[in-house]
Amino acid sequence: MTIVLCALGWLAGCATMSPVEHAAALEAQNKQRVQQLTEELYNLRKLDRISEYIAEDFVDRSQGAPRDVVGPAAMRQQAEASFQAFPELKFDILHLLADGDLVLVHWKATGPDPKQVDEAGTARDLQLQGHSLYRLRDGKVVEAWDISDRLSPLLQRGYKVVPPTL
């Protein structure tokens, strides 16, 4: 009987996750959620699913983000503005890293630039790149910080960087 109880105790110990395993599983789950968010919201334009990914107390802490709009409404407002400016933009995840409750996405977005149309009416492709850092709680994003390359799109549109004259 003692051997059976010891064996059961050993098996029970094997069935539990160590703190390191639990942290790794949470990071993997958070990375998967952010990957799904990127695909469903930004590539498939499923705005009706925002509340599945964005917490009610969500805050966008990006530079220039409106401070008076929070929760899923903030994400919807941002996404709708992006879709209006670039209706066919497609996002690709280049790198996806997790550390605890934080997930960092290095992304590239490509699509026709409505502001650059040739004589035949064909829009030239525009490429954007950036990083989005998300903090998740219970599978939902509660904070976000976005940094994007704002100079590259201007250069792609033909703007020039002119050094100052001394």
Image (cartoon, grey):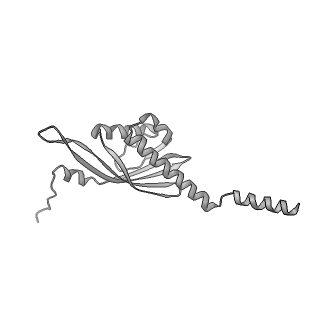
Q: Quadrant of the C terminus?
A: bottom left
State the image coordinates of residue 122 (x, y, percent, origin top left): 18, 40
Determine whether 139 is above or below 149 in the image. above
> Which image quadrant is residue 115 in?
top left
Residue projecting furthest to the top = 48
Residue projecting furthest to the right = 1
Left/right placement of residue 23 relative to residue 113 reads right
Q: Quadrant of the N terminus?
A: bottom right
Residue drawn at 45 percent across, 48 percent down:
35
Q: Is residue 103 visible?
A: yes
Residue drawn at 24 percent across, 48 percent down:
126
Determine whether 89 is above or below 131 in the image. above
Left/right placement of residue 87 relative to residue 98 reads left
Q: Is residue 54 visible?
A: no
State the image coordinates of residue 92 (x, y, percent, origin top left): 36, 50
State the image coordinates of residue 25 (x, y, percent, origin top left): 57, 55
Residue drawn at 70 percent across, 60 percent down:
14
> Which image quadrant is residue 112 in?
top left
Residue projecting furthest to the bottom = 166
Left/right placement of residue 156 relative to residue 68 reads left
Residue drawn at 49 percent across, 50 percent down:
32
Which of the pair 124/137 is nearer the observer?
124
State the image coordinates of residue 70 (x, y, percent, origin top left): 44, 40
Which of the pair 148/86 is nearer the observer?
86
Determine whether 98 is above or below 44 in the image. below
Total marks drawn? Answer: 0
